[in-house]
Image (cartoon, grey):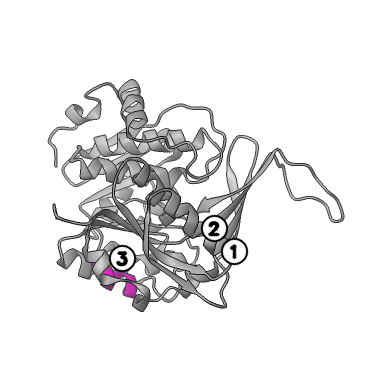
Amino acid sequence: MSDAKFDVVCLGILVADVVVSGIDGLPPPATICPVAGLSLGLGGCAANTAVCLARLGLRVAVVGKLGDDPLGRFVLDALKVERVNVEGVRVASGTATGAAVACIYPGGERGFWSLLGANGEMRPEDVDLELIGAAKVLHVAGSPFLKGFNGVPCAKLMRLARSQGVLTSLDTIHYGVGFRDLVEPEMRETDLLLPSHDEARALSEEHTPAAMAAQLLRHGARAVAIKMGGAGAYVADGRHSAMVPGIKTAVVDTVGAGDAFVAGFLAGWLQERSLAGCAQWGNVLGAQCVAAPGATAGVRGREALLAQAAAAYGDAGFDDFCGSKK
């Protein structure tokens, strides 16, 4: 769709993140414990990926739901500052905006307290179909948390998008019991499947990246990229496969790292890089993300991406190694 209005429309969860760093557990009752840092920022995998894409110079819109409250206004304003189109964001009165407290432990790993909020009020009628049809890529992010929309209704929207020539992409969030059954209809309607290692294992019921990817491809995806944290990513499309090593960097916190990887991967795909070349870009953005606090602060733009990719992988990198372009 060369005449598309948007390169990517990110549909999914929108969240206000409170990031707390320098903790080693819960404070005992009736005590006050100091922390190293505390900040309010934009969060949620649809918002995070959209911001990273916009910083790379792509035309991006988000589709999701917020509450009519101060946090909702904060999220909307933050997206606008990043030049992300918010025409597809709906505001629900009487419902709180989705929010999370991200606790950053020593070493950078995070844990969340999460309020689903307005994300759980998302319904098919909330989606602007014209907006979806105006995209090159529809990226669905965190659908298991879109109660009332996930599963079959989401799959129907993805099928409609594909019928209009829109590429579909899916980034899941592990949901616990019933996760595989919930996501399976969506997997059948996605072109690019981008799970974490744990999610890929739950969805495929396999134990090695190669076996996971092979099983997931049987659902109909054109390509699978399994995010494996600092180790990198395993990619496969039925013709080519590779373990693309990650980039060593000092880890400040891991909030948003997977979302940044997805943005890099999608940007590479739209630039018609090879499958492993897309993962290179994803790894670079993931490394940039974890090197700074919060979900998107470390992602610096296209020139920084290209410079870090060349330094890490060389000018050709895996593109030549893995063979043909798409």
* Cβ atoms under marks 2 and 1 closer than 8 Å: yes
In the displayed structure, does residue 10 sit left or right of residue 133? right
Q: Quadrant of the C terminus?
A: top left
Task: Indicate whether residue 154 is drawn in magenta.
Answer: yes
Marking on residue 23: none
Q: Which residue is mark 3?
A: 186
The magenta region covers 152-158
Q: Earlier in the sequence, mark 3 or mark 2?
A: 2
Under mark 1, the amino acid is Pro
Mark 3 surroundings within 10 Å by alpha-carbon count, few (fewer than 14), some (14 through 19), many (20 or more): many
| Disc 2, SS | helix
Residue 70, disc:
1
User: The residue under label 2 is which amino acid type?
Assistant: Phe
Quick one: label 2, few (<14), some, or many (20+) residues within 10 Å? some
Magenta stretch, main secondary structure, is helix
In this rendering, position of residue 135 left or right of residue 41: left
